[in-house]
Image: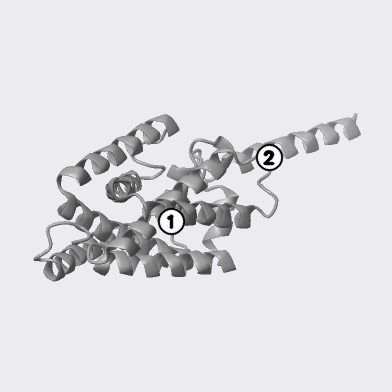
Amino acid sequence: MALDLAGSLNIGNTISNTVGGIFNSSDTISPQLPSNVTDVLHTITANDGILGAVAIGVGFYFLILGFKLYKPTMFLMGFVAGAIAGYSALMHFRPAGGYPSDSNVIMYGSGALGLMTGSLLLCIIKLGIAIIGGVGGLFLSLFILGLRDFGVIEYGTGRTIFICACVLVGIISAFFLEKHVVIVATSFVGGYGICFGIDCFAKVGFRTASEAFLSSGNSSSLVEFQTNPKVIALCVSILVLTLGGVLIQYRINGGRKRHGD
């Protein structure tokens, strides 16, 4: 009987300690970032370096010369649009286990489609103007969505509708206000690209926002993110860079009424 009583007491203590450990210090469970996001925040790969350098370089070009140099702007905007479309498609159809050589397939596959789209726009002028407005609307939507934890709009369908609406407004506006839309759009995309490129190295979470919104059609590819003071600082930097780019471009293009004159 003594042995049975001692065994029962030991079992009771074990259960008590286990339950106490679960609810010790707080009854609230804080949301945690997925492990893949945690890994991203602490690792810089060769692809990160390439992507960051390209984004910063293209960003500075758009910021200063987006309206002045016609054909390079058409090509680069087409490249950006095609690369984003390719990334979104690859993430949408991405298998749960990822592609073979996953990061290379996504990055270089997107880049290849970007090059093809950029080359196509050199031959179709009006489509190029529409793409500039559309890309400007796209980046504006990504900026707005990234102002709150897990997105201003948290669900994939709502995000998609909002992004498409912003793109459509940008396209329509470009045909009626060509010079102003091109200057503002290239300045904003340039500022966004510079901050995106910086975060490829800094890893504060700004880049994660764009990835989340462009891949939200596939739950296995969904990356959640949380804002923090450093992300907010990059968002403010985009606005400052955009304003600077707009002022510079109006200054150096004062006598030109249309893109390509």
Front in this rendered view, residue 141 or 190: 190
Q: Distance between the residues labelled 2 and 1?
A: 63 Å
Which residue is situated farthest in the left direction here?
A: 255
Tell me the element at label 1.
helix
Where's residue 180, x and y in %?
15, 54
Residue 34 at what x, y percent from top left?
56, 47
**Circle 2 is placed at which residue position?**
18
Visual colour scheme: one colour
Residue 224 in sight here:
no
| Residue at the image point whose x is 55% and y is 58% from the top | 40
* Image quarter of the C terminus: bottom left
Residue 143: x, y in percent? Answer: 32, 49
In the rendered view, tell whether residue 148 sits above or below residue 186. above
151 relative position to 241: left or right: right
Q: Mark 1 points at which residue?
A: 119
- Number of callouts in the render? 2
Q: Is residue 40 above or below residue 252?
A: above
Question: Closest to the observer: 33 or 87?
Answer: 87
Residue 31 in picture, x, y percent from top left: 49, 43
Query: Quadrant where the N terminus lies?
Result: top right
For marks 2 and 1, the one nearer the N-term is 2
3 versus 227 height, above or below: above
* Number of the front mark, 2 or 1: 1
